[in-house]
Image (cartoon, rainbow, N blue to C red):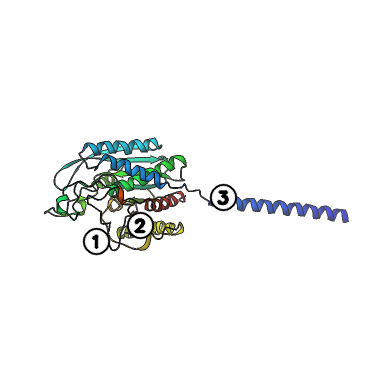
């Protein structure tokens, strides 16, 4: 009897140890599955992409510089493993000018039905109409921040996606003709549909029939010094949960000095038409700088001073790392 008891006790002990090991392994597996490795955003790399665009000069539609920069952006997306779609369109500007526009789309894992849309505009403004010196009002904007910064951050995101794919499909779109809206000195009617012509065109004519995405994130002017990003009001109206997701993640990462968890202004931007027309809930990460003299976007906005001297790698890092953390944690 004692022998049987010892054998029974030994069997129970082995079973308990085995169960314990199995339980621990199961917990370890669950923990490993929950832990997502997010790539490290390289602000130096993003800065170089911005510099490369600025080196072309102002990227105003209907210019050779615009054509050359478009080729650069498309080639970079292709180099980083994206399936590239070029969407060419003749778009009518507020003053009757026909703009030879080009939306550049880079798709990752295009067969995946669960998708996230990341977008920015890549054109620059033909007029420095917010410059304090009226003599500069007809000078094109170089657009280091207003145009190149969003595209530069997304090129770095593309480079990292090519190295380590997230769980969902990603589409990166560089929208054209965003900044050809009527200048301040224009005497006619000023309408919101004069802006964001490339985004409006894509929203009505997506690169894939029936295209949809879980949500969209617009990056506009995301490289300025001392930039602060408030929750833009159209974003709150159409995609409040996405705003919460972004600002919560920024706080977790230690970027709450950049991402101020308060409501900001209501801004006509590419995301507005993606929301209204394509009906993809989208938010706008765009600066709202309290105390700026000439514009809440920064005193260099739509002036001849929007150059590389206004770009801050700390801002690029805060925005880029936050966006990466959000998209890599989506399942």
Q: Residue at x 18, y 48 (%)?
A: 127
Foreground of the two, 85 or 317: 317
Which is more toward the observer, 46 or 34?
46
Closer to the N terminus: mark 1 or mark 2? 2
Residue sitting at x 28%, y 53%:
272
Which of the numbered marks, if any, corresponds to residue 32?
3
Q: Is residue 56 at all visible to an observer of this figure? A: yes
Q: Nearer the viewer, mark 1 or mark 3?
A: 1
Q: Residue at label 2?
A: 239
Could you tell me residue 148's position as x and y percent?
Answer: 30, 46
User: How far apart are the two marked residues, 1 and 3, measured between alpha carbons?
Assistant: 50 Å
Answer left or right for 24 relative to 187: right
Tell me the distance, in whole angstroms, between the alpha carbons under discs 3 and 2.
Answer: 31 Å
- Label 3 sits on a secondary structure element that is helix
Nearer-the-camera pick, 65 or 136: 136
Q: Please tell me whether mark 2 sits on a helix, a strand or a loop.
A: helix
Pointer 2 local density, CA inside 10 Å: few below 14, some 14–19, many at least 20? some
Residue 293 image label = 1
**Between discs 3 and 2, the one toward the N terminus:** 3
- Residue 326 picture location, percent across and down: 43, 52
Between 227 and 330, the one nearer to me in the picture: 227
Residue 291, position as x, y percentages in the image: 28, 63
User: Which is in the foreground here, disc 1 or disc 2?
Assistant: 1
Query: Where does the image place residue 193, in percent across and percent down from the top left?
Result: 21, 51
Element at label 1: loop
- Front of the two marks 3 and 2: 3
| Mark-to-mark CA distance, 1 and 2 | 30 Å
- Residue 207 visible in the snapshot: no
Residue at 43% of width from left, 42% of height from top? Answer: 161
């Amino acid at each position: 009897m004692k022998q049987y008891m010892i054998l029974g006790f030994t069997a129970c002990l082995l079973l308990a140890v085995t169960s314990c090991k199995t339980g621990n392994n199961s917990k370890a597996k669950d923990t490993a599955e929950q832990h997502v490795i997010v790539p490290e955003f390289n602000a130096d790399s993003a800065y170089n992409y911005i510099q490369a665009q600025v080196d072309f000069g102002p990227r105003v539609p209907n210019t050779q510089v615009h054509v050359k920069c478009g080729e650069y952006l498309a080639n970079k997306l292709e180099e980083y493993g994206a399936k590239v779609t070029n969407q060419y369109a003749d778009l009518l500007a507020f003053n009757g000018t026909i703009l030879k526009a080009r939306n550049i789309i880079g798709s990752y894992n295009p067969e995946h039905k669960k998708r996230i849309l990341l977008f920015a505009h890549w054109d620059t403004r033909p007029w420095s109409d917010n410059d304090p010196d009226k003599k500069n009002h007809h000078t094109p904007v170089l657009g280091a921040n207003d145009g190149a910064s969003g595209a530069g951050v997304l090129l770095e995101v593309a480079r990292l996606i090519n190295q380590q794919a997230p769980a969902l499909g990603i589409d990166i779109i560089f929208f054209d003709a965003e900044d050809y809206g009527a200048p301040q000195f224009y005497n006619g009617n000023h309408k919101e549909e004069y802006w964001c012509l490339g985004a409006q065109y894509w929203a009505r004519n997506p690169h894939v029939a029936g295209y949809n995405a879980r949500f969209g994130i617009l990056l506009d002017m995301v490289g300025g010094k001392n930039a602060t990003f408030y929750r833009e009001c159209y974003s709150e109206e159409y995609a409040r949960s996405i705003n919460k997701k972004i600002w919560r993640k920024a706080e977790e990462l230690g970027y709450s000095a950049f991402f101020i968890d308060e409501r900001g202004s209501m801004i006509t931007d590419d995301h507005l038409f993606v929301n209204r027309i394509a009906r993809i809930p989208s938010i706008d990460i765009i600066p709202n700088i309290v105390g700026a003299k000439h514009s809440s976007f920064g005193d260099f906005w739509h002036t001849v001073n929007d150059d590389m001297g206004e770009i801050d790698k700390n801002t690029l890092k805060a925005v880029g790392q936050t966006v990466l953390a959000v998209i890599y944690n989506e399942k």
